[in-house]
Amino acid sequence: MEENYKSIKETERFSLISRLRSANHAWRGLGIVFKTTHNIWVHLFFTVAVAALGFILCISTIEWLFVVLAIGFVLVTETINTAIEIDIDLTSPEYHPYARDTKDVAAGAVLLAVLFAVIVGLIIFVPKLTVLI
């Protein structure tokens, strides 16, 4: 079996065309997420709302860094969750408790990311909003 295995380095040389194809596949994947995942639109709504609030309250550069990282973390986990759900739907079309558990764990990862983002938002925005009240 090992004789038939060749590393990627041995079989494929660097090619700008192949890198562009890879990028095209990645954009296609994001398109699938936006077409099939309703929650991504909820996340994007809150992204726009938080960004608007950040501009209105003139948050600092370091605060922007944490906000952007928290938002990115949520979007990345939602994207990975979507990939896991697609794979589970393919490999386990009938109901199976392990398939359910796998999907629930992936969704739990998104929930943790959202909770982290909410905590970051509360730390940054609550003090600024309480000054205005």
Image (spheres, helix red, strand yellow):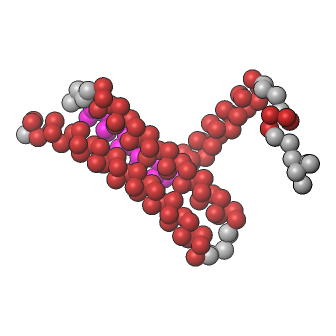
* Residue sitting farthest toward the right: 3
**SS majority, magenta:** helix
Circle count: 0
At which x and y percent is residue 60? 26, 26
At which x and y percent is residue 61? 30, 25
Q: Nearer the viewer, residue 25 or 116?
A: 116
At which x and y percent is residue 115? 34, 53
Measuring 59% from the left and 42% from the top, which residue is drawn there?
A: 31
Q: Is residue 3 above or below residue 51?
A: below
Image quadrant holding the C terminus, namely top left
Task: Classify residue 29 as left or right of residue 79.
Answer: right
Q: Nearer the viewer, residue 116 or 96?
A: 116
Q: Nearer the viewer, residue 32 or 118?
A: 118
Measuring 85% from the left and 35% from the top, which residue is drawn there?
A: 10
- Magenta-span inclusion, residue 106: no
Measuring 9% from the left and 35% from the top, which residue is drawn there?
A: 132
Quadrant of residue 94 in the image? bottom right
* Residue sitting farthest toward the front: 2
Query: Which stretch appears magenta?
Result: 37-56
At which x and y percent is residue 90? 69, 62
Quadrant of residue 58 in the image? top left
Is there any visible trace of residue 103 in the rendered image?
A: yes
* Residue sitting farthest toward the top: 16
- Magenta-span inclusion, residue 47: yes
Task: Classify residue 5 as left or right of residue 77.
Answer: right
Is there any visible trace of residue 44 in the rendered image?
A: no
Q: Is residue 102 above or below residue 125?
A: below
Measuring 30% from the left and 29% from the top, which residue is drawn there?
A: 62
Image quadrant holding the N terminus, namely bottom right
Task: Classify residue 126 as left or right of residue 30.
Answer: left
